Image (cartoon, coloured by chain):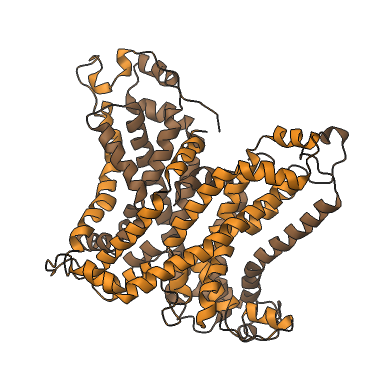
Chain colours: A brown, B orange
């Protein structure tokens, strides 16, 4: 992902104007493209801005026409009310816990499995790997009925594990990691073996540190998709105390009644964490999507 | 990422073969020396939460089971026979396919357009990513409630108010009229997820060697010519990938419809996954719901047959 945040100002350095598309000379066409891009960017930001604007209005003015971006006064009442009700904090913590656990377990089990499949040998290895690859074709959504029945039988409905465990074993992640491990030179491990290190040690002290970029990609992608997952947590949690953020919000939208400022305040609070994470880790997230996006979740 | 190519054939040493078969250095070989130990945790979860439901679901689809998985009688293929004759299966399947068609075209084209724009400009990249990609990171609950509660309501919603401000007739039932509901859901989906395709395209654009453009420019090719004859052909594989990923993602639509219209008006937007949910979870016919799931699965498998090209490309990407 090079080329990000490169030329900030119109550059007229002669060195930068070699042949090709690298130069940033401000022609008329380029200016027109910039205007077009700015309009499109604004169009995409408008719904977010509208949510924020509504959340800052007094409740009585949220449905007033004609169009007004700012109410008669700016107030944080809606935020205070939403926060006082307490549920949002609870769901936020549930989301953080289940997403982090799912991410840690996914990275750990998938990396171990990928190492096992690429660097060790045991009876049935090829068959098992074939079985895992075949699983890439199975979308979890088609399994909701039998999976839920299984959860009832295991007593995992309305538990954290009921939310977490079915999201952990993602065959596509194993595939991505296998492809990466295959590219890691074996010589690095050989030396450690000669020094008497075992498989476990080699895995932890050599393979895992070497794979940090791809592990980060897998982790980021898993976190985003579990944080945003709606269908499965929606099915497996019925008790509001155990709901994740997206499920909780949808569940209570009726109890907010017609208090639009409060609904929007809740949405802003719910949307903020990942947006902040995004601004902090833009580069890694973009790279992560470019790599694991190919998992096609 | 480091660009490690395939490792050269390693020296064949005894150490190198399976740990289990290596010359026994110490009498007590540790349990972690066996390869299966590495694979076991994943396999256990995989078997429990993917393979087993996949198999037990087939069994279930042959019974009249209720939601708790008890009290079902074997009914053979009766559920499948019923599903094939059930007009609700066909209409929700059609809604799913129609949504997929309506959403895939703009999601691919707009994603490509935004990527070309941002790649061409090479300035304030953070702004393009923030506006076009960041919505993708919002939970579906947040996005759908925002659009359903503040953008699309008749009268005071932003969509209607914008029309009014432009001097047009407001009062459109964006989500309550059959001719607009699906389009409104598509628009929401495009706003929400186009950033993903934008990023895949942007990554592909940045991988195109600069010298191709330089050479063409020296030969006098204009910007338009270079776009048509260099950039777009170089993006062909990415487009194939994006289209397949998008179709598979769109077929699984549930959240947007469930939250925004509940499948209405008059079930005109209800997708197949919602029908499965209604049959199994609110109608307590889990056996029948399973049968419908497998018909849906068959549809997805057919679409997935286009995937060999995709997995080749994936392998290349992942190995980078």
Q: Position of residue A65 (x, y in %)?
A: 68, 86
Q: Nearer the viewer, residue A232 or B170?
A: B170
- Of residue B31 and residue B167, the one placed in the foreground of this image is B167
Q: Residue at x 28, y 33 (%)?
A: A126
- The answer to whether B183 appears left or right of A49 in the picture is left
Along the line of sight, the residue nearer the viewer: B257 or B70 = B257
Which quarter shows the N terminus of chain B? Answer: top right
Give above or below for B200 relative to B210: below
Q: Would residue B117 appear left or right of B299 to someone viewing this image?
A: right
Q: In terms of image quadrants, where is residue A14?
A: top right
**Looking at this view, is A273 or A222 the one in front?**
A222
The x and y percentages for residue B3 are: 55, 28
**Is residue B40 visible to us here?**
yes
Tell me if residue A163 can be seen. Answer: no
Residue A102 position (above or below residue A114): below
Q: Quadrant of residue A124?
A: top left
């Amino acid at each position: 992902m090079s080329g990000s945040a490169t030329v900030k100002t119109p550059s007229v350095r002669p060195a930068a104007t070699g042949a090709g598309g690298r130069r940033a000379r401000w022609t008329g066409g380029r200016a027109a493209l910039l205007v077009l891009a700015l309009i499109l960017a604004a169009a995409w930001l408008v719904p977010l801005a509208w949510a924020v604007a509504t959340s800052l209005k007094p409740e009585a003015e949220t449905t007033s026409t004609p169009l007004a971006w700012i109410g008669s006064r700016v107030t944080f009442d809606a935020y205070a009310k939403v926060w006082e009700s307490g549920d949002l904090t609870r769901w936020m913590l549930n989301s953080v816990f289940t997403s982090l656990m799912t991410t840690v377990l996914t990275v750990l089990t998938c990396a171990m499995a990928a190492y096992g499949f690429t660097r060790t040998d045991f009876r049935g290895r090829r068959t098992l790997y074939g079985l895992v690859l075949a699983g890439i074709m199975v979308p979890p959504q088609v399994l909701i009925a039998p999976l839920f029945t299984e959860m009832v039988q295991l007593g995992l409905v309305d538990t954290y594990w009921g939310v977490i465990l079915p999201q952990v074993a993602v065959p596509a992640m194993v595939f991505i990691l296998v492809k990466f491990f295959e590219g890691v030179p074996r010589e690095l491990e050989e030396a450690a073996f000669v020094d008497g290190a075992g498989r476990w040690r080699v895995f932890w002290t050599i393979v895992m540190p070497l794979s940090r970029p791809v592990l980060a990609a897998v982790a980021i992608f898993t976190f985003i998709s579990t944080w945003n997952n709606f269908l499965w947590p929606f099915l497996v949690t019925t008790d509001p105390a155990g709901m994740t953020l997206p499920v909780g919000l949808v569940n209570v939208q009726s109890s907010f009644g017609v208090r639009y400022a409060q609904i929007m305040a809740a949405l802003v609070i719910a949307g903020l964490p990942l947006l902040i994470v995004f601004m902090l880790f833009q580069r890694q997230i973009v790279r992560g999507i470019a790599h694991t996006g190919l998992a096609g979740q | 990422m480091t660009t490690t190519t395939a490792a050269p054939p390693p020296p064949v040493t005894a150490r190198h073969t399976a740990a289990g078969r290596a010359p026994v250095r110490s009498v007590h070989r540790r349990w972690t020396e066996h390869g299966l130990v590495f694979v076991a945790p994943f396999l256990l979860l995989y078997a429990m939460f993917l393979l087993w439901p996949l198999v037990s679901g087939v069994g279930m689809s042959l019974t009249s089971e209720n939601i708790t998985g008890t009290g079902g009688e074997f009914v053979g293929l009766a559920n499948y026979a019923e599903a094939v004759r059930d007009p609700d299966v066909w209409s929700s399947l059609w809604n799913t396919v129609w949504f997929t068609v309506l959403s895939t075209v703009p999601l691919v084209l707009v994603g490509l357009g935004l990527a070309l724009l941002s790649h061409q400009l090479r300035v304030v990249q953070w702004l393009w990513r923030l506006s076009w990609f960041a919505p993708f990171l919002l939970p579906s609950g947040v996005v759908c409630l925002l659009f359903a509660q503040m953008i699309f309501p008749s009268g005071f919603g932003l969509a209607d108010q914008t029309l009014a401000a432009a001097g047009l007739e407001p009062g459109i039932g964006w989500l309550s009229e059959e001719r607009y509901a699906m389009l409104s859901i598509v628009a929401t989906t495009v706003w929400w997820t186009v950033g993903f395709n934008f990023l895949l395209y942007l990554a592909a654009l940045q991988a195109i060697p600069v010298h191709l453009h330089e050479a063409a420019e020296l030969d006098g090719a204009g910007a338009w010519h270079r776009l048509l004859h260099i950039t777009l052909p170089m993006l062909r594989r990415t487009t194939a990938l994006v289209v397949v990923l998008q179709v598979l993602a769109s077929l699984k639509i549930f959240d947007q419809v469930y939250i925004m219209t509940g499948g209405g008006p008059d079930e005109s937007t209800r997708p197949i996954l919602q029908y499965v949910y209604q049959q199994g979870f609110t109608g307590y016919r889990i056996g029948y719901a399973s049968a419908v799931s497998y018909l849906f699965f068959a549809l997805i498998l057919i679409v997935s047959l286009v995937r060999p090209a995709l997995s080749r490309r994936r392998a290349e990407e992942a190995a980078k």
